[in-house]
Amino acid sequence: MKQSQLFTKTIKEAPKDEVSVNARLLTRAGFIYKNSAGIYSFLPLGWRVIQKISSIIREEMAAIGGQEMFMTALHDKHYLQSTGRWNVDVIFKVAEEGKEPAFNLSWTHEEIITEIATKYISSYKDLPFAAYQIQAKFRNEPRAKSGLLRGREFLMKDLYSFHTTEEDLFKYYDKAAESYKKIFNRCGLDSIYTLAGGGDFTLNNTHEFQVLCDAGEDTIYVCEKCGYAENKEISKLGDGSKCPKCGGPVKESKSIEVGNIFPLGTKYSEAFGLKFSDEKSEKKYVVMGSYGIGLGRVMATVVEKFYDEKGIVWPKAVAPFEIHLIQIGDSPQVKKTADKLYQDLQKAKKEVLYDDRKDKSAGEKFAEADLIGIPLRVVASERTLEKNCAELKERSQAQMKLVKITQVLKHV
């Protein structure tokens, strides 16, 4: 993409009403736009990051048998009434003028997927299976803050699994946990598998995937020896306690929750009459699990973990582009060389943002490139062309190097 054609622009000053690093940098760099408190639009650069995260999720979901679908965001109230969740505080309810609310905007989809499953599951031969979606969720968050970390509207990948027994559920539960570790690792995040409470989804203990970060709103206790972790909200541990698993020292740390998994049991299948016939033709309730990842949270966490005084430093796997090609100077030779590099990189299937703008100085272009944070910068200028070279610099490194124009493709 040519940067001259990108309709968004960077801004020098961060919005005064944003205090979190992710909101300030993502807004300044032109990745997101704040519409209201806790409600953001993803601009072209931001949407490219979300698509990268989505692709990683889809690949890992396919690897554990997840079937992608897309469910409605507007729910009749009978769904939540069936499970006693209609009056949960965070729900946005929808009413026709002059009438009582009869619908709600999706805050989760356990009820929806369970009712759908009743039409297709009748025998043990139909189980197990898992289905997921990537869809908007709406929660009336009273403390919408921290940018994309705590919003009222957000993108979530929610996976639901269906089983004949709890034993089969927990086999898949462990498989999903490993899949989540892979997803976060591919996004550049080192996640910690953390014991947590059940909340409004289940009465059992659940697990979260936490990323250590000073900007986090959660507090977890992590064993420095074996990595066992518990969320402070349900824990009897303290800073300096002995690990209940290995006896090692436990450390208190701030963290960001990027995903969670829930063993639902038969709570929802009982509410909707979701049963199957076993090998003896006996009717039993289907056992379920639920697994969620907040895509915007992952994006925000990456920013909170990877930035410096100049801007964002994207890991390659989730960066909006692989290469930021910058033309410095508008002489015919420089333009011809930069244009040719752009064409060659595109032919080589490289994702390139080409700064071909004529109304920006070299200093402005470099400052914007650092703010946007694309992993590799390639510069063509009159100075570099004197040596028949281009300048290459990784965003995460201070040093730069000159590479012959004919060798640029090889080096990138």
Image (tube, helix red, strand yellow):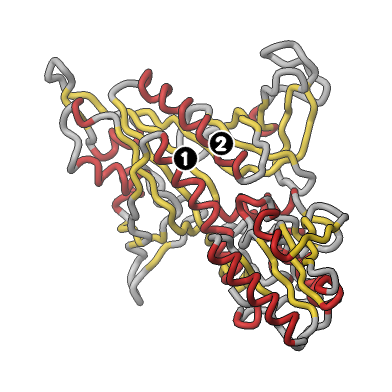
Q: In which quarter of the image is the C terminus?
A: bottom right
Rate crowding at label 1 as few (under 14), some (14 to 19) or many (20 or more) other CA atoms within 10 Å: some
x, y percentage for residue 211? 68, 40
x, y percentage for residue 114? 29, 42
What residue is rendered at 70% in x and 23% in y? 227
Residue beneath label 1, please? 60
Circles 2 and 1: CB distance less than 8 Å?
Answer: yes
Spot the residue most to the left.
Answer: 281
Residue beneath label 2, please? 182
Amino acid type of the residue that numbered disc 1 sits on in the rendered structure: Glu
> Please, is residue 284 above or below residue 412 in the view?
above
x, y percentage for residue 334? 75, 80
* Residue 20 appearing in the image: no
Mark 2 and mark 1: Cα distance apart in space: 8 Å
> Does 340 sit left or right of 155 as displayed?
right
Amino acid type of the residue that numbered disc 2 sits on in the rendered structure: Lys
Spot the residue most to the top.
Answer: 247
What residue is rendered at 37% in x and 18% in y? 167
What residue is rendered at 25% in x and 29% in y? 127
> Does 278 sit left or right of 158 as displayed?
left
Give the image quarter of residue 376.
Answer: bottom right
| Label 2 SS | helix
